[in-house]
Image (tube, rainbow, N blue to C red):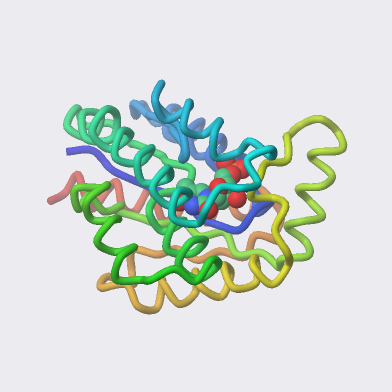
Amino acid sequence: MGLFITFEGTDGSGKTTQIQQLTAHLETEGRIVCTTREPGGTKIGNQIRHVLHDVNNIEMTAEAEILLYSASRAQLVRELVLPRLAQGEVVLCDRYVESTYAYQGYGRELNFDMLRRLGEFATQGVRPDLIIYLDLDIQAGLARKATLAATGQEVLNRMDKLEQDFYQRVRDGYHELARQDSEPTRWLILDASAPIETISQQVWARVSALLESVIST
Ligand code: TMP
């Protein structure tokens, strides 16, 4: 069985950079790595991503939004995550069900029982071995995202148009999720304002220890 690692964080927290660095590190060690993201990661998932991110879809209801994120996730788990894990690969996913709990649960304040049931259904109960949460001040994240957008490195999406209170609830929500997890040690919470190299060393320290423990069991 492989290793399933997810990256979480509010927008602009630097997940993409850290995923690239970890992928390179793992490949140097001879690991086969599958990197993917949510929403998206499959042909169907990418079509759903387009609908979710289209800034013209202002009439999208919170209920439709959660079902679309969940549909993309269900496709990803069955089509990619489970088969790759079965082949012994390391699967790195940019966002997973914790994003729904943070953004739709804490951000949009949707009913948590419903979200949990939907989350279980979409993931078939597949949990990450490690959740790397990059914690960043909301103002700093939004500023970073605006710079990336201004330099054409990123396109702002429908979820980037929300008010600051929303993102603050999401950030607080992530901390709450880590505290309430039945296995809180599966969370690695890092200060995303630290230099990129410092963060990638912290990530590698944890991932290499995890790989060793998997090999020795
Ligand atoms: P990103 O690909 O740039 O991270 O953008 C994805 C956006 O979608 C981001 O604002 C977080 C949001 N999102 C949710 O609201 N719920 C979810 O379940 C997922 C996966 C993402």
Q: Quadrant of residue 105?
A: bottom left
Image location (x, y in percent) of residue 70: 36, 46
Q: From the viewer's perspective, tell me whether residue 34 is left or right of residue 87.
A: right
Image height of 97 relative to 55, above or below: below
Q: Quadrant of residue 142?
A: bottom right
Q: Residue at horizontal 47%, vertical 39%?
A: 39
Image height of 126 relative to 45, above or below: below
Image location (x, y in percent) of residue 167: 65, 65
Q: Residue at horizontal 22%, vertical 35%?
A: 82
Can residue 204 be seen in this snapshot? Answer: no
User: 187 or 153, which lies in front?
Assistant: 153
User: 205 or 169, which lies in front?
Assistant: 169
Q: Quadrant of residue 199?
A: bottom right
Image height of 183 relative to 122, above or below: below
User: 166 or 128, which lies in front?
Assistant: 166
Residue extending farthest left: 217
Residue extending farthest top: 43
User: 13 or 113, which lies in front?
Assistant: 113
Q: Residue at horizontal 30%, vertical 33%?
A: 75
Image location (x, y in percent) of residue 99: 46, 56
Image location (x, y in percent) of residue 206: 41, 56
Quadrant location of the N terminus in the rendered image: top left
Q: From the viewer's perspective, tell me whether residue 50 is left or right of residue 44.
A: right
Callout count:
0
Q: Residue at horizontal 43%, vertical 45%?
A: 69
Can residue 79 be seen in this snapshot? Answer: yes
Residue extending farthest front: 59
